[in-house]
């Protein structure tokens, strides 16, 4: 792959609370041979709330980023945060779908001598971009430290799969599962992989938020995971920072690290924990490195079903 | 050309046309079209008074051609052609302008536009009709044999009705035994009589009837010919068992060492051997060898069945046979396939072990099934204490199938009854709407409610094993919005039954194409008329019956099977059938013998005559599609009733400026 430059929209959270994500994205980009070029003078995407409060300014706020990116001649823009991704994607789509909105947004942009023609940019999530453009073959090829023996719960969160599905399935996507397996680790059968982490609910109703966080952590641990892999800074923060609070509320003692997918890729590529922003998390993830085995663990034999058990479904294709 | 005298009749069709199109104006305006000697409007042209008007006018005004502007020719072309014929006018001197489907119905909001379009269409017909020539229908003999494709309950019923009337039937079934889905069921709603008990006598009759040739484990490969004279090629797949010698004793499958999960008859819940008979009452009783799983075909060893067979009936070297049969009529009764619930991943089928399909439950509850009728969880031993039945899985859902599968409500009620009767478990039905519309169905619904089943109105969004509370641990939790109380609910149960919907068979398009039956937008075969001609197709001599026409239950399938049989018997008893004289004809004096048309013809109706160096159309095979007419580089093929003169005149007619006072060709 020749050195390719992607127009990059990091989003606010990667600058502050989730700086580890930014660090690992940069490190992995360098190792895989592509460049992330930040949009000049980008601004907040409005997160989840602004659209519910005041729609037109919310669209205009997001469109400003699209306009600035398109101004630089880009044809696609990559976002590592699911909320940013969704807002950029939605704004582009809705401007195309609703001409009136398009006119209003462009009028607002006009005040800053900007304009955006919907459809100019293809909005992509970093996960989808790496899987599609870099590809599994290349990931496998560049793997220096296969993550043998590690079990990861692939947590996609709710924003990337809905309403428009950019992965392989809305309900049970498997692209990240496949990626985890390519890197030598095992993806667990994690049922709540597309469930909501609670978003900003922690600021509104702790009880509701901790309930949502707790069920995801419990389901991930029950699935046999050593760590949860996320693709969204919001998900990572909720599951990591509030894990202890959720434990307190439910009387549990879960202690499962919550990683960014680029940290997992980076580990497999042989990058050092420091290069990947390890140490900024609440639930320590360094212990995982010691769990990596030198060779693939023997394939667990499928549990033998008792003699009297009925077969699991095999429907004719 | 002698003087042309055209009569024009514009129909109101009650308000259907007159509500939008200014019918009186169209009739008045049409009176000025060339050659028109009389132009009238009428409330209902298809009524006897309307038809009689045509007959009287033909005599009184000495009409040479007739145009009726009304509905679609599919509806009433025959009616008006007959009216002309009764007055002594050749029916092909009649032309129809469709001002209902093509004008009033589609332009209901634009009265002036619709009226203008109606005028254009009448003008086109008037211009065209004077070029039409008298044609005589062809008569062909009807062979008395019939082919029935599909040996489920619909096909069996069709075959028996025809055979009982004394005519021969070839009954082709893809599987090793006839019986279809009905043979797999436990009880039938709403009477709860045993499905096998009412079906197997019919299967036996079909298998032993002197007038039925049963071609099981066979598939139709090719169909040629036309109504009355079809030639059908059937592949009889090798059973690897000599049917003349086999007694169906069962020694072979008892001793066969290879056990295979039976995904067809046992819906994946039970097993069979590599040599097997799908079920004890199978018709015919002979087993088949499953070549994919048999050790002999993998390694050349074993031959256990051969060793134990007392009549030496095993034939490892048997090959498929090709059989050609000649039939006069064909009935398609190819049935349905079950929606694959794995397409809805949030229902967890295939992942959560205690989620079952409706077909799996039928086998579970069936006394001859893998658990001998015990309703147990997938572990094979535990009786459920609570069971959820999810309706409309893959039906009435625009993500999958928009149609209602017609049987699921009643089948789900039946499941509720069987679960409560056999296990005493608590039953929850998750429904969208209850549809219990046939005889005895609503009463059955009430009976099940009185028996204590719970009904929750709400579409299940998810079935999960991720518990929220200690009570949910180890259970399957159904998440839905209960729309009657207006709240989200989580209902933990031990077992879930998905009432998966009925779909057209995956190969319905292909099969339909082979037989000349089309598939509608839902994928089921299309009937000629949804209300008035539900078992005929657009191809003469090809009929449809049962769930291949649309999702339906057993009574409706039987009724359609019998209806298709009645239609077939009617044509057989007429002994002859009239074929439309709309055929292509080659002017042999001008044919260069290039043979382009030979290959273009989709019905293989054109042969090259070596001796004369020209191509010739077999009028019995020709369907009048016009492909060859368009393809002929010398333009020497004439499509009767669709001649160049007629089409050009029709276009001239439609180009008349209907808004101008004067009649001018634009």
Image (cartoon, coloured by chain):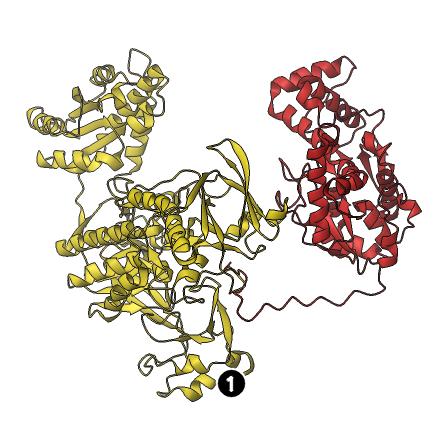
Chain colours: A red, B yellow
Q: Does residue A109 appear left or right of residue B530 in this picture?
A: right
Give the answer, above or below, for where B652 lies relative to B235.
above
Q: In the rendered image, which quarter is residue B627 located in?
A: top left
Give the answer, above or below, for where B374 lies relative to B8.
below
Q: Which residue is mark 1?
A: B302
Q: Nearer the viewer, residue A290 or B301?
A: A290
Please state the chain letter of the residue tagged with numbered disc 1 in the rendered image.
B
* Quadrant position of the N terminus of chain B in the picture: top left
Q: Residue furthest top?
A: B661
Q: Where residue A276 sits in the image (x, y, percent)? A: 89, 45
Q: Where residue B596 sits in the image (x, y, percent)? A: 40, 52
Name the residue at 33% across, 74% down: B285
Q: Nearer the viewer, residue B457 or B396?
A: B457
Q: Nearer the viewer, residue B589 or B527?
A: B527
Give the answer, above or below, for where A37 lies relative to B509.
above
Image label count: 1
Q: Where residue A212 sits in the image (x, y, percent)? A: 69, 39
**Element assignment for label 1:** loop
Q: In the rendered image, which quarter is residue B161 located in?
A: bottom left
Is residue B510 visible from the viewing direction of this image? no
Q: Does residue A112 appear left or right of residue B378 in this picture?
A: right
Q: In the rendered image, which quarter is residue B83 located in?
A: top left
Is residue B348 visible from the viewing direction of this image? yes
Name the residue at 36% across, 60% down: B186
Give the answer, above or below, for where B482 lies relative to B179.
above
Q: Does residue B22 appear left or right of residue B316 in this picture?
A: left
Q: Nearer the viewer, residue A18 or B189?
A: B189
Q: Where residue A114 sits in the image (x, y, percent)? A: 77, 18
């Amino acid at each position: 792959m020749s050195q390719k430059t992607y127009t990059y929209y990091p989003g606010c959270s990667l600058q502050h609370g989730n700086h580890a994500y930014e660090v690992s994205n940069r490190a992995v980009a360098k190792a895989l041979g592509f460049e992330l070029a930040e949009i000049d003078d980008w601004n907040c995407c409005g997160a989840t709330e602004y659209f519910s409060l005041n729609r037109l300014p919310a669209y205009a706020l997001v469109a400003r980023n699209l306009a600035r990116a398109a101004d630089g001649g880009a044809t696609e823009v990559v976002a590592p945060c699911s909320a940013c991704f969704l807002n950029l994607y939605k704004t582009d789509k809705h401007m195309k779908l609703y001409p009136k909105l398009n006119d209003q947004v462009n009028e607002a942009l006009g005040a800053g001598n900007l304009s955006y023609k919907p459809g100019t940019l293809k909005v992509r999530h970093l996960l989808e971009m790496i899987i599609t453009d870099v590809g599994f073959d290349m990931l496998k090829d560049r793997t220096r430290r296969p993550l043998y023996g590690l079990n990861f719960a692939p947590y996609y969160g709710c924003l990337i799969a809905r309403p428009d599905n950019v992965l392989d399935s809305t309900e049970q996507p498997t692209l990240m599962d496949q990626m985890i397996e390519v890197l030598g680790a095992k993806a667990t059968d994690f049922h709540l992989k597309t469930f909501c982490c609670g978003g900003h609910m922690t600021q509104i109703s702790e009880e509701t938020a901790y309930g949502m966080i707790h069920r995801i952590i419990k389901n991930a641990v029950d699935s046999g995971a050593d760590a949860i892999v996320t693709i969204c800074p919001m998900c990572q923060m909720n599951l990591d920072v509030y894990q202890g609070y959720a434990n307190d509320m439910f009387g549990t003692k879960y202690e499962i690290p919550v990683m960014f997918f680029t940290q997992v890729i980076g580990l497999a590529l042989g990058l050092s924990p420091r290069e990947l922003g390890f140490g900024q998390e609440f639930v320590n993830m360094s212990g995982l490195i010691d769990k990596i085995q030198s060779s693939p663990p023997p394939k667990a034999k499928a549990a033998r079903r008792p003699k009297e058990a009925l077969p699991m479904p095999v429907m004719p294709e | 050309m002698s003087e042309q005298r055209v009569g024009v009749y514009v129909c109101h069709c009650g308000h259907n046309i007159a509500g939008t199109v200014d019918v009186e104006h169209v009739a008045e305006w049409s009176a000025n079209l060339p050659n028109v000697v009389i132009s009238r409007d009428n409330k209902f042209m298809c009524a006897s008074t309307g038809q009689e008007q045509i007959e009287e006018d033909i005599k009184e005004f000495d009409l040479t051609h007739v145009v009726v502007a009304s509905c679609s020719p599919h509806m009433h072309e025959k009616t008006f052609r007959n009216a002309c014929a009764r007055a002594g006018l050749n029916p092909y001197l009649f032309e129809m302008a469709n001002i209902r489907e093509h004008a009033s119905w589609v332009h209901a909001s634009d009265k002036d536009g619709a009226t203008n379009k109606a005028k254009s269409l009448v003008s086109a017909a008037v211009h065209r009709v004077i070029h039409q020539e008298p044609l005589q229908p062809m008569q062909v003999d009807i062979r008395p044999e019939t082919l029935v494709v599909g040996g489920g309950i619909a096909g069996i019923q069709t075959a028996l009705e025809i055979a009982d009337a004394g005519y021969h039937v070839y009954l082709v079934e893809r599987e090793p035994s006839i019986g279809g889905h009905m043979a797999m069921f436990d009880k039938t709603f709403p009477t709860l009589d045993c499905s096998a008990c009412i079906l197997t006598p019919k299967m036996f009759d079909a298998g032993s009837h002197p007038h039925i040739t049963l071609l099981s484990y066979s598939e139709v490969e090719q169909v040629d010919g036309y109504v009355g004279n079809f030639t059908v090629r059937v592949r009889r797949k090798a059973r690897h068992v000599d049917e003349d010698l086999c007694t169906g004793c069962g020694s072979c499958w008892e001793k066969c060492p290879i056990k295979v999960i039976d995904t067809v008859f046992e819906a994946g819940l039970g097993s069979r051997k590599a040599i097997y008979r799908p079920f004890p009452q199978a018709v015919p009783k002979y087993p088949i060898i499953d070549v994919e799983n048999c050790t002999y075909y993998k390694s050349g060893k074993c031959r256990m069945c051969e060793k134990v067979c007392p009549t030496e009936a095993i034939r490892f070297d048997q090959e498929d046979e090709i059989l050609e049969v000649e039939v006069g009529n064909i009935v398609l009764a190819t049935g349905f396939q079950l929606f694959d619930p794995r397409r809805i991943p949030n229902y967890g089928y295939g992942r959560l072990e205690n989620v079952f399909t409706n077909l799996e439950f039928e086998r579970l509850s069936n006394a001859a099934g893998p658990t001998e009728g015990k309703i147990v969880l997938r572990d094979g031993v535990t009786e459920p204490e609570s069971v959820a039945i999810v309706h409309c899985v893959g039906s009435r859902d625009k993500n999958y199938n928009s149609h209602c599968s017609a049987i699921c409500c009643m089948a789900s009620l039946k499941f509720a009854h069987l679960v409560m009767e056999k296990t005493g478990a608590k039953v929850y039905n998750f429904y969208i709407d209850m549809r219990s519309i046939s005889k005895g169905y609503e009463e059955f619904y009430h009976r099940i409610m009185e028996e204590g089943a719970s009904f929750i109105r709400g579409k299940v969004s998810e079935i999960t094993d991720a518990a929220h509370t200690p009570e949910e641990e180890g259970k399957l939790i159904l998440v839905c919005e209960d729309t009657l109380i207006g709240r989200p609910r989580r209902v933990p149960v031990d077992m879930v039954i998905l009432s998966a919907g009925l779909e057209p068979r995956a190969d319905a398009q292909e099969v339909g194409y082979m037989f000349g039956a089309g598939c509608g937008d839902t994928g089921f075969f299309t009937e000629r008329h949804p209300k008035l001609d539900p078992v005929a197709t657009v191809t003469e001599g090809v009929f449809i019956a049962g769930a291949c026409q649309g999702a339906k239950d057993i009574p409706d399938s039987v009724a359609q099977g019998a209806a298709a049989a009645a239609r077939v018997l009617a044509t057989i008893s007429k002994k002859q059938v009239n074929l439309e004289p709309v055929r292509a004809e080659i002017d042999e004096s001008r044919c260069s013998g290039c043979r382009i048309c030979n290959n273009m013809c989709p019905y293989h109706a054109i042969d090259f005559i070596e001796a004369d160096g020209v191509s010739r159309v077999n009028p019995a095979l020709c369907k009048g599609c016009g492909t060859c007419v368009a393809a002929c580089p010398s333009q020497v093929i004439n499509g009767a009733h669709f001649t160049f003169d007629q089409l050009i005149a029709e276009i001239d007619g439609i180009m008349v400026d209907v808004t101008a006072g004067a009649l001018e060709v634009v």
